[in-house]
Amino acid sequence: MTTLADPEPGGRPGDLRQAPARTADLAARGVHGIVLAYVDTAGIARVKTIPTARLEAAVAWGVGMSPVFDTFLADDSFVTTDVLGSPDGDLRLYPDLDHLVPLAGQPGWAWAPVDRITQEGDRHPGCARTFLRRTVADAAERHGLAFRAAVEIEWAVGLDSAPAGEFVPAVSGPAYGAIRQVELSDYTAELLATLGAQGVDVDQLHPEYAPGQFEVSVGALDPVAAADRSVLVRQTIRAVARRHRLRVSFAPAYLPEGVGNGGHLHLSCWRDGVNLHAGGAGRYGMTAEAESFVAGVLAHLPGLTAVTAPSPASYLRLQPSQWAGVFTAWGRETREAAVRIVTGTAGRRDQDANMEVKPVDLAANPYLALGCVIAAGLDGSTTGRPLPREITGDPARYGPEEAAALGVRRLPRSLPQAVEEFRADRVLRAALGPVLADAVIAVRLGDAAAAEGLRPAQLAAAYRWAY
Ligand code: GLU
Ligand code: MG
């Protein structure tokens, strides 16, 4: 369960009580150090580490880290907003013991996501994890809603021995091909064992479409835990790859053309333990509330793109007819619509039915992405927004007039376009609050400026190993 109480100087009561026993247990398991992890606005996972003996102090008083990372860019330069990006100041990182995991993939280490608070004990308005936790808590208090979420992870496996900066696929063989499964048999078997040992329930692992590409899907959890899990799973995929002399890329476009790496979000709304996406009177068993929630996500997708596709390289991936879902449309099991309705198999629908949001990649901060998608959906469900008609097949086939008549819009084609849509979206900006919303705008514009003028091959190369 996600800890709802914010940490404060002196720690979270629940965590403080657990800390001595957890420390002893970790030491007994040979854990020497703890990775304290969060994701910045640009989507880069940043860490500090502490020796295991310091865990109790970290839980009680946090660990210092500069707030400057809130406005860091993907290339480690930084921009400023009126309140962020100063070289001054300090924040405290508070590990969340409910989500601390000994790392089977990095023996000697454990991993914990952190919340960031000020030295005075206030919530840091730039903390993405706190934003998501507050969004979920607010939905529970005000609407009686809970959510289950999962982040799909696609990645490309390259040879560590490739010339500097280049991507050379570590496997040959066709998409979904048995050849790839055999060629990376040892790596993927160790990966499954490692994820299992870390408490990650894997649904599937398969060779994907693009060169050297694989995908793993994992079980759904509450949104904060799902975002934590997506960060942990990527850390593990990378750690296991290193031992096999492999190098992994989670970049949206690790090659300049063709299909890229997605990070599709799966999300369902629940009330009193009942899935609102199944057993209802609406389309494909959705309740009226779930239909409106989906309609809300669809309506806000243009602005959401600035959060879910945050890299200049995201727009190499976000092309029609590459399964990235670049049109504001929904349908059952549609792969080219931005929102795919997943009903699940008859007999399992009350558990499995959900919506999948496709124009999301793994440069996205998963806490910001899930929180903003939930805020968009709640805007739809609380206003009773009608869900437009279903679109099946590839919306790329429509001419401009037909698309306009059907309400099908192409999502932004570049990061600056996405920022314009985001600026115009009051619901998303209000949900994030001014500090985070300004950070999103400043960081996106900074990243866009850094990438200006790059040709596709240079753009793919610039961000290939960044995320
Ligand atoms: N790789 C595709 C993407 O960039 C997704 C492929 C699929 O449908 O799983 O989103
Ligand atoms: Mg896939």
Image (cartoon, rainbow, N blue to C red):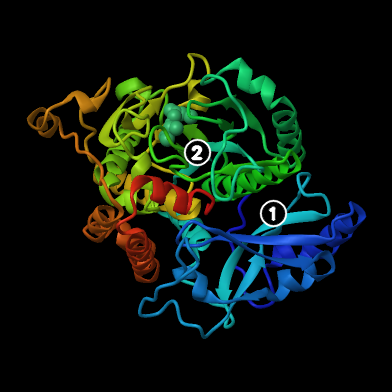
Q: Position of residue 399 (x, y in %)?
A: 12, 28
Q: Residue 359 is drawn in which quadrant?
A: top left
Q: Residue at x 39, y 45 (%)?
A: 457
In 3D space, how far apart are the residues under numbered discs 2 and 1 (Cα atoms)? 23 Å
Residue 278 visible in the picture: yes
Q: Position of residue 28 (x, y in %)?
A: 92, 55
Residue 268 visible in the picture: no
Question: Does residue 252 appear left or right of residue 173 in this picture?
Answer: left
Looking at this view, is 182 or 9 the one in front?
182
Q: Position of residue 226 (x, y in %)?
A: 56, 45
Question: Does residue 150 appear left or right of residue 304 in this picture?
Answer: right
Q: Residue at x 57, y 41 (%)?
A: 221
Neighbourhood count class around disc 1 (C-alpha, 10 Å): few under 14, some 14–19, many 20 upward: some
Q: Nearer the viewer, mark 2 or mark 1?
A: 1
Which residue is farthest left? Answer: 401
Q: Residue 396 is drawn in which quadrant?
A: top left
Looking at this view, is 335 or 168 the one in front?
168
- Pick whichever of labels 2 and 1 is earlier in the sequence: 1
Which residue is farthest front? Answer: 163
Q: Residue at x 35, y 46 (%)?
A: 456
Q: Secondary structure at mark 2?
A: loop
Question: Does residue 149 appear left or right of residue 1 in this picture?
Answer: left
Which residue is farthest right? Answer: 28
Q: Which mark is residue 272?
A: 2
Q: Secondary structure at mark 1?
A: helix
Neighbourhood count class around disc 2 (C-alpha, 10 Å): few under 14, some 14–19, many 20 upward: few
Looking at this view, is 343 or 309 the one in front?
309
- Which three-letter amino acid code belongs to the residue tagged 2? Asp
| Residue that label 1 marks | 98
182 w.r.t. 12: above or below: above
Looking at this view, is 212 or 165 the one in front?
165
